[in-house]
Amino acid sequence: MDKQTALLLGLHCHQPVDNFHHVVDEAIEKSYKPFFEVASKYKDFKFSLHYSGWLLEYIKKSDEELFSLMRVLAQNGQIEFLTGGFYEPILASISSSDRKAQIKKLNDFIEENFNQAPKGLWLSERVWDSAIVKDLIHCGIEYVVVDDYHFIAAGFDKKNLNGYFLTEDEGEILKIFPINKHLRYTIPFENPLKVKEYLESIGDEIISAGVIFDDGEKFGIWPKTHEWVYEKKWLENFIEEILKSDIVKCMLYKEYLHISKPISLAYLPITSYMEMGEWALGAKENIELHKIENALEKDFSKDDIEKFVKGSIWKNFLVKYPEANRIQKRYTELSNNKIEDENYLESLYKAQTNDVLWHGVFGGIYLPNLRDNAYRFIIDCENIRYFEKECTEIKDINLDGYDEIKCVSKNLITIFDTKSGAQLVEFDIRDRSFNLQNGMSRYFESYHEKILNPSSSKKETQKPKNSDEDEDCISTIHEINEDIDKYKKIIRHDWHTKNSFIDHITDFEANLQSFDASNFNEYGDFANQPFELVYAKDQKVKLRRYGGIYKNSQKTDARVTKSFHTKDERIDFEISILSKTKERFYYLLEHNFHFANLKDLKITAQSLNQNSHIKVDGVNESFEILNSNILMIFDKYTKKEITIEFSKAADIFLSPLDTVSQSESGFELTNQALSLGFKFLLESPMKLTGTIEVR
């Protein structure tokens, strides 16, 4: 028998649930539809397909032409649909019952619209955990697709992965296909002829598989790809090269299973693709990992390094980003208190979408609109769960060993965290399903080294293969160069998470600039340390910390007590500070409130010493208001006015909280919240009362 290679080409297409419609429409016009238009011209060109459920629903409603093309190709046997969680959750991050429900929902949609009963499943972000095996088999799944890196991390030889393997859990068998990394990095970026030649080179008398299942957005949405794939006809040329090959044959995954035997039994570690493991590490650990890899390159091959030097697992994002952990633990709480109500379940499943919980080349957790959507679904569930009930619950919601206190009133849901300085970590406006506390801290990321120390940081991927004169290939998103100089002056890093009711003990030098940069002098140990819960009942919470004020290596005992009362549409609060210090200090109370768009805010305040009324339309930069005890913020998006009032006047700092993150197009400056600092002269004993009202 001559050499043969089965090209198992698969496309995974997904958009975050309720993503901006113009973003989804652009993906349809530049990527999804033109791919089907080209593919429909070649009846012998077969490929497999996974579209997340929400995206399929969107296309069905908004683009009849594309949806009809999908149906025609499915009817002709040209495409095979793979299933998954309907709203694209990381299956290992949700409960068994939710896993099965989400898979069944997408199965039903595919059967109803395309007359196919899926036997294959796409794992969101290729996150493998053997704990899901039984649930997949229960849903009728016969095979899944992961990366070749999963097998390499388990000790397999990279050269012997051109087929499929078997794994099992308590005797129940699942088939696993490893995606070929070389194909993932060359399709559609490399010359079609070279891709074909590679596929022919891996052929064997026993039919080898060229396994590729990757983002459909590569075919038109990633930078420069629309022109390359369609205008310069990469896709047409690729299909024609494959169809005229005597060795390579397009095939569906289910077809390949009928004509081939498994390579061997395999047990895989909990892992995802290699880059995801690197991204899941802390920033400093990520930098160290690359240093270790560079050092090992002197004595070991790259394949050996990949096998033994690994990053972290996907769930470490829940450790790396407290904001991600809060979202995941909130929908876990809702799942554990499930209500068999159709609207509740839909909102719960939508909240479980994976995009908002991690960060790598794509924005993920740094994208405010995705976090807003997640909390909208969470709050929609809470509104059904509590309806008109008012209550106080004490529970370790985020599973960190410390209790949180949830206060539910008619119009608000507030959550205070005993571990994080007795701070407000969730502030939900119930009738708008909007969390005012849904900000994001400015974390140090490993790629910030490229901005801060460009000469010492090593580029994480190979240099672009092409030049202006070379039209044989294009760069992948991992290879795009970025002008970094403009970000040097604006990048900031926080030493504490950006919640609200953060207690700082500082000095006279604390000003607008140091508040914005989060580098003012800190003398207390209250901003990021635990408080003890004194009581919580009837939406009233009292918390206390016996800490200290530190200066010149000397500690002076200090106590901060905070009381909150969530009622109707307001939070009443009282903060008392007791210390025997004779030094002159200032108390800086920090809030960080998230808004959809700072440019839509209208801010008013009364400056008492100047006897002037201050009005600001839209926040574009940091500013301060001196000697005022009341601040009003009208938000056009929620149509709510937030009024913050104190029993005494303060100097108020207002500063946009902006992050520098990485996306498929390069670096991005994104607003996450509006930071508010209220600076008071610290007197002991000090008693500060006030309200935050949302009207």
Image (cartoon, rainbow, N blue to C red):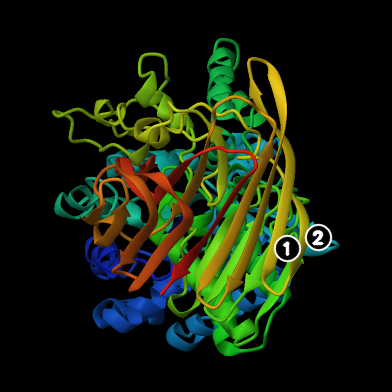
Mark 1–mark 2 distance (CA, rounded to whole Å): 7 Å
Question: Could you tell me how many numbered marks the image carries?
Answer: 2
For the C terminus, give its image quadrant: bottom left
Residue located beneath label 1 in the image: 133
Residue located beneath label 2 in the image: 169
Assign a secondary structure to mark 2.
strand
Q: Is residue 23 left or right of residue 162?
A: left
- Residue 606: percent from left, percent from top: 30, 55
Toward the right, the furthest residue is 170
Instruction: Characterize the local packing of mark 1: few (<14), some (14-19) or many (20 or more) Cα atoms within 10 angstroms.
Output: some
Q: Please, what is the three-letter code of the amino acid marked with disc 2?
A: Asp
> Visible in this render: residue 350?
no
Residue plotted at (54% across, 54% down) = 357
- Residue 195: percent from left, percent from top: 35, 42
Q: Is residue 31 left or right of residue 121?
A: left
- The reply to whether the C-beta atoms of the residues labelled 1 and 2 are less than 8 Å apart is yes
Quarter of the image holding residue 637? bottom left
Task: Name above or below for residue 533 compared with residue 103.
Answer: above
